[in-house]
Image (spheres, rainbow, N blue to C red):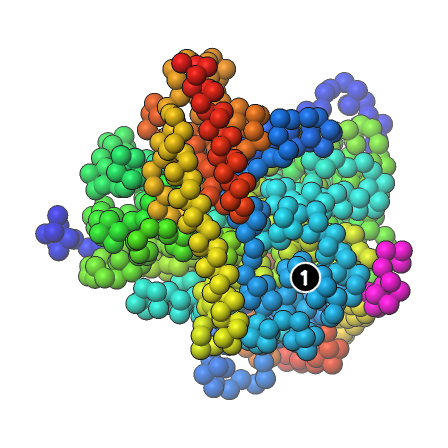
Amino acid sequence: MFSKRLCRAYSTTLNESTIARPLIRTEYAVRGAIADKAATMKKQMEQGIKFPFDKITHLNVGNPQDLGQKPITFNREVLASCLTDDPERNRMIYSADAVDRADFYLSNINNRAAGAYSDSPGIDIIVKEVKSFIEKRDDVEVGEDNIFLTEGANEGITLMMRLLIREKSDGIMIPIPQYPIYSALTTKYNGSQVPYYLDENKGWGMSYEELERSYNEATDRGVNVRALVVINPGNPTGHVLTQKDLNKVIQFAHDKQILVLADEVYQRNIYVDKEFCSVRKTLSELGSPYNDHVELASFHSLSKGLHGECGLRGGFMELHNIDSFANATINKFKAITSCANIIGQIGVGLMVNPPTQDTVSEGVFDAYQEQEQAIFNGLKRRANIMTEKLNGIEGITCNEVEGAMYAFPKIDLPQSYCDSAHKEGVAPDLKYCLDILEKTGIMIVPGSGFGQEEGTYHFRITNLVKSEEEMDAALQQIGNFTADLM
Amino acid sequence: MLSRISIKYFSRTYKASLNKDTIPSSIIRSEYAVRGAIAEKALKMQRQMEDEVKFPFEKIIQLNIGNPQNLGQKPISFNREVLASCLTNDIEGSRMIFSSDAVDRAEYYLSHFKHRAIGAYTDIQGVRCIMREVKSFIEKRDGVNVDENNIFLTNGATEGITFMLNLLIKDENDGIMIPIPQYPMYSALITKFEGTQVPYYLDESKGWGMSFEELERSYAEATDKGINVRSMVVINPGNPTGQVLAQEDLNRVIQFAHDKQIFLLADEVYQRNIYVDKEFCSVRKAIKELGSPYDNDVELASFHSLSKGLHGECGLRGGFLELHNIDSVVNLAIYKFKAVASCGNIIGQIGVGLMANPPTKDTVSKEVFDLYQTQEQHIHDGLKYRANLITEKLNSIQGITCNEIEGAMYAFPQIKLPQSYCDLAHQEGLSPDLKYCLEILDKTGIMIVPGSGFGQEEGTYHFRITNLVDSKSEMIKALDRIGEFTSDLMSLYK
């Protein structure tokens, strides 16, 4: 055995040739090439290398608190009180209302232990809060067994995608442009992406005809379409679907007998005169037979909205018309990963069951409202500023940002620039974003990461920089760079 | 359009498209006993109790899961004060009610976040300053040099283990060697990823120790069947068995892995739970001390967690993964997995920092240090005491034999179920140890897990029970009830 070792080369057993191809092919643009380059530049800056800007500005990820948004005080006091279970002491520095709410949660957790695993679907009392929230919002009846508390919306989406994709021929209809997690997961699980295009000329709206076209094209090539993803409000487009739009989606899903995945994490981020209508509510109001049949998984998250608690990793999934065996399987899956982290779960409870005028003191309620309102106003104002300023740049056109946290402007890159990019083996919009990063330190994400009509180029930029001055400056620099480029 | 569609509906039935026939079979086959049949029955019973149905016991006792705080273990004050201070970012206020050392530590972490915002997504691998704490921890513990890029902060150890198994299993011919008995998450994940389980048996007659011959036998048997053995899992201290591997044992494991050129997965989450006169030696350290060529060649992923040890913060979901001798594409793949899954939750990450970099005599006040030590010592003493108590009591029950619990949080006793009982179980379509556990639950409210969930030598039966009930009297009562039930069973089915 000893001589064997001396005369043979030891090579790693886990390498590019031994890892399954789908895993290697999985791409996630939001943190891809731009993030890599920024990391390199950051290291160089730390080594003292000079750049034509002070710092790197992260306008690539929907990460509100990283850009100055403050957390809601009441929520954080509740979470802190849950971790240091000494109500008398906590009352010295937190509001009595916050301490009471913490006590409410702790008294519904065995041994008041926030550090214990909970039941896999989630802490019972919080599941009930989520149930009430949905029932009130949508005027429906919700079964507790259909609610799962998850690590962000991510965990629920991943679970459903994993269940839906058995083999390459299983297809998932994804809006183009989309939040790249859907394409990443479809690739990872070795399924087929079935794109349906949103119409940039119609404010990024969807049409029944396009759904049909997309479905038919897929089935023609032998794809078995399993589900349809709806992101409402849209990411990266921000488009808010009306109830009429959703009716069409549901009728389509019913006709094809496919499952609907409703990503509704931005439901509290709407900046225009439109109301959020959940797919669940739409189904209920459409009534029979849709409400009895259409399989639905809806996702919500603590990361967006007005709380922006990305780092706490909280979210939930609600199932409707899901087969009981499938439900049991989801439960089994949840059990393997134990449970979602408790702080995230409590954060979700606070999101769905916020303090009201009747349940807390006036001082606490007013502060809560003010904080949320300030955040909302800021997001709305910056959404408008972004749309305006981007449209003011020659070569760039941007649809109105109706909701979510992004603008997704189109940029008419000159042919010669595109040719140059192709020579370098880089998508033109990626080249544009890399150049912007290099010249201005601003991180944005190329449209190719989200999907776009062939021959068009876009980028996604967030409206999250809290300081309007800073945002103006960033947009100014993008404007200057783009003008020079043109 | 609507009328066109309605006609269609009246003439066909709608079938849920996501059902038993359409869910991937690997997922259907994946079983996780710790929260399986016993947990389902307990849930039903819990609901019945809420509906006022009477049972011959007051409450259900969860001795099935390694969930310390659920059974009375208290968290460490210093840690919680740091976490609370980070959450409210109110340094002045926090100083009024928490130790200034805790607030200082929170200040240290907060100063490393942009805008002091722990509610933001972090770098994919984890918060840099915490990764450095983990790096120092490993370097100090093992006398090695650690590359920060080989560390990932994860949601419990589970997440890291899941990533590695996903990468290692390309198709059903890829085999992963797992100890029998094992923590059922391994078998569940291997099945989920459609790989092949390659069992290597631990020796119950030798305190659940492992032998080189058995590793060879297991490997040879698999390769003879055409299995491509990709990796070997080592759980040290063991779960459910608790045995602590000596450095000599680990050397043989490493040499074996090197000889077969397979990837080592070292699950070391119970490294602070050792109740006998043995030291924990990490695989990382053993490889280093073995030196060349092992230290340059053997691929290793080591996992640790905030859920066990003396902090028992299962619900916070903190852990880390350390890689050694891996191809850069592995690092990249895990980075991508993590990017899609998003960063580990911040509270869990900070918890890991606190675990890896605890307060010391030099860094905090005497009062804070003493309290910290006292709290940890109390927890350790309790775990050790109950480990001994359980072993003793279980061995005194006729029909039950139990190896000494060297570490971790469980006893895994063998129960010699009468043949007639086993026959009855088989008639009912149940594994005899599952029937036993279901009946224990029914009669006493105690949840334990059947050995079949963990794997055992054919024809033997075991169950796993935790040593976590904080109250000594409650622990004794539970064991007495198990004893009574078992002796009744033995007489009844003689």
Q: Is residue A307 visible?
A: no
Answer with left or right where residue A211 lies relative to residue A248.
Answer: left
| Closest to the observer, A99 or A387 | A99
Q: Residues within 10 Å of mark 1 (few under 14, many from 20)?
A: few
Q: Residue A389 sits in which quadrant? A: bottom right
Instruction: Verify whether residue A47 appears in magenta.
Output: no
What is the x, y in percent for residue A115?
58, 53
In the displayed structure, would residue B420 be above or below residue A394?
above
Q: How many marks?
A: 1
The residue positioned 48% from the left and 60% from the top of the image is B376
Q: Report the residue that reaches farthest toward the left.
A: A3
Q: Quadrant of the C terminus of chain B?
A: top left
Q: Name the chain under label 1.
A: A
Q: Quadrant of the N terminus of chain B?
A: top right
What is the x, y in percent for residue A432?
58, 70
The residue positioned 39% from the left and 59% from the top of the image is B322
Residue type (three-letter) at the residue carrying disc 1: Asp
What is the x, y in percent for residue B347?
58, 61
Residue identifier under label 1? A86
> Secondary structure beneath disc 1?
loop
Answer with left or right where residue A8 lies relative to residue A332.
Answer: left
In the displayed structure, would residue B358 be above or below residue B187?
below
Q: Residue B84 sits in which quadrant? A: bottom right
Answer with left or right where residue B193 lies relative to residue B119.
Answer: left
Q: Main secondary structure of the magenta part?
A: helix
The residue positioned 68% from the left and 75% from the top of the image is B96
Q: Residue A334 sits in which quadrant? A: top right
| Closest to the observer, B172 or B302 | B302
- Magenta span covers which residues? A357-370
